[in-house]
Image: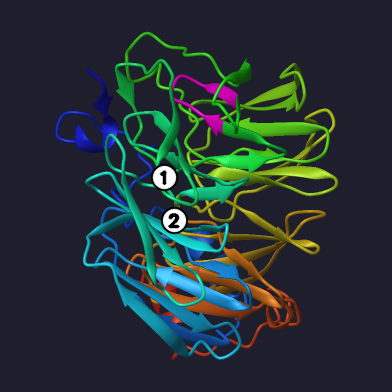
């Protein structure tokens, strides 16, 4: 019987749980709080609201010029990407657990009961409902006439995109103790890539679900069952030559995309995830550091510890910047060449667990409270550098950070 760490917190204490459990815990030192207090923050271009999500992590999507958002109450809404104005909404009449996925002209969401719901992206019309084996915590993905769904019990289901009919199911080996997570699957070039509990990365044929190759990102280590947990709890990243993944209590590793042969690996622990650009691999560590590695050989390039003690979202690379959200509801902008922090912009103060979503001229994020915020990257990059920012004590950002520092007045 598989045990889920997020469901076992009554007798197991683990900081790596990728649920919202522990996300409100702040462990910033007075020195860190002082450093962050002088980092300038941009105002959002616009903000709106969907619905709070206490035990799930929802992410908005940008598609065909619109932003789509959903929350646990079952409401699926479309927003104008420029103004943030809500332009349409659908009541799914379900308690949602995962979403939103897009592809094949559909919007895809799922429930704790294992229902996968497909809607027409243009008019919101229900297309089909399919049943899988257990709760779905990640966005379903659609490509190549298939909808691929990652399920809480470790299975991967492929459904016909037109009808929702089951095409194939993959079931890998699952350790007795696993970390509950919101990782889904990555589909590219007719291959489904997914990381699993126990540190394995799998490549599956999209057409029939057969295993193309299997690789080991990290092997279990330690004396106790808890110490041996080394799950891949985030999406892999990919380019033309390689696919890379990172494991909790394990390693970050890159593999040849065609054969699965390992190219390089480095010890690290992340339950949030990673990103890739033309030069580097960026990892959000589980203790709050952001680290950059050379993508060709894994050489460490820089490490930024200013957010140590916070839980981080997966990073997003946009132009020359790395963007990471955190458990205090801030959106942090770093320079990708050296890791220096440029901006730290506030939302509603609740955690942001999912990767910021790229927009044509910025990013969008969704908070635990259901806040939907859009920021202009240009506005964030033209702020005064840290130390030169003009910050007023009336700003919510400064008031919050100063509350953590006894001598801040």
Tell me where residue 391 appears, x and y as whole percent.
57, 86
Q: Nearer the viewer, residue 13 or 3?
A: 3
CA neighbours of label 2 inside 10 A, class few (<14), some (14 to 19), many (20+): many
Please identify the dominant SS of the magenta region.
strand
Q: Is residue 204 above or below residue 300?
A: above
Quadrant containing the N terminus in the rendered view: top left
Residue most extreme to the left: 10
Q: Nearer the viewer, residue 273 or 391?
A: 273
Q: Earlier in the sequence, mark 2 or mark 1?
A: 1
Is residue 288 shown in magenta? no
Helix, strand or loop under label 2? loop
Distance from the alpha carbon under mark 2 to that under mark 1 = 9 Å
Q: Which is in the foreground here, disc 2 or disc 1?
A: 1
Helix, strand or loop under label 1? loop
Quadrant containing the C terminus in the rendered view: bottom left
Residue at point 61% right, 53% down? 315
Tell me where residue 153 appears, x and y as whole percent.
32, 30
Range of residues picked out in magenta: 194-203
Q: Quadrant of residue 178?
A: top left
Q: Quadrant of residue 165?
A: top left
The residue that mark 2 highlights is 353
Q: Nearer the viewer, residue 126 or 102?
A: 126
The residue that mark 1 highlights is 182
Tell me where residue 404 appears, x and y as whole percent.
38, 67
Q: Is residue 128 above or below residue 386?
A: above
Is label 2 in contact with label 1 (beta carbons under 8 Å)? yes
- Residue 4 left/right relative to 30: left
């Amino acid at each position: 019987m598989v045990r889920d760490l997020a469901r076992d917190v009554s007798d197991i204490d683990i900081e790596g749980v990728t649920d919202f459990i522990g996300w409100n815990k702040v462990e910033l030192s007075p020195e860190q709080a002082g450093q962050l207090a002088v980092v300038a923050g941009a105002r959002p271009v616009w903000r709106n609201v969907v619905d709070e999500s206490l035990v799930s992590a929802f992410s908005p999507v940008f598609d065909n010029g619109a932003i789509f958002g959903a929350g646990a109450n079952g409401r699926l809404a479309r927003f104008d990407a420029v103004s943030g104005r809500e332009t349409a909404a659908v009541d799914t009449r379900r308690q949602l657990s995962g979403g939103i996925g897009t592809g094949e002209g559909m919007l895809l969401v799922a429930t704790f009961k294992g229902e996968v719901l497909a809607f027409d992206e243009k008019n919101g019309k229900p297309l089909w409902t399919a049943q899988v084996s257990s709760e779905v915590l990640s966005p379903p993905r659609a490509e190549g006439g298939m909808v691929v769904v990652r399920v809480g019990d470790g299975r991967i289901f492929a459904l016909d995109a037109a009808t929702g009919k089951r095409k194939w199911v993959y079931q890998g080996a699952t350790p007795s103790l696993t970390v509950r997570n919101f990782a889904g699957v990555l589909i590219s070039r007719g291959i489904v890539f997914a990381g699993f509990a126990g540190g394995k990365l799998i490549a599956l044929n999209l057409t029939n679900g057969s295993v193309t190759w299997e690789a080991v990102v990290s092997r279990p280590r330690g004396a106790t069952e808890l110490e041996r947990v080394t799950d891949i709890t985030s999406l892999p990243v990919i380019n033309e030559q390689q696919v890379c993944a990172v494991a909790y209590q394990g390693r970050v590793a890159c593999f040849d995309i065609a054969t699965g042969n390992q190219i390089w690996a480095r010890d690290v622990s992340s339950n949030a995830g990673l990103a890739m650009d033309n030069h580097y691999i960026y990892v959000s560590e589980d203790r709050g550091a952001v680290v950059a590695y050379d993508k060709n050989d894994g050489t460490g390039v820089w490490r930024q510890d200013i957010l140590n003690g916070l839980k981080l979202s997966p990073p997003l690379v946009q132009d020359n910047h790395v963007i990471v959200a955190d458990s205090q509801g801030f959106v942090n902008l770093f320079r990708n060449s050296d890791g220096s922090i440029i901006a730290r912009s506030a939302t509603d103060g609740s955690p942001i667990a999912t990767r910021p979503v790229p927009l044509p001229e910025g990013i969008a994020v969704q908070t635990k409270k259901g806040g939907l915020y859009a920021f202009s990257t240009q506005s964030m990059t033209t702020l005064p550098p840290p130390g030169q920012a003009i910050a007023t004590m009336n700003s919510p950002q400064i008031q919050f950070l100063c509350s953590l520092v006894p001598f801040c007045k």
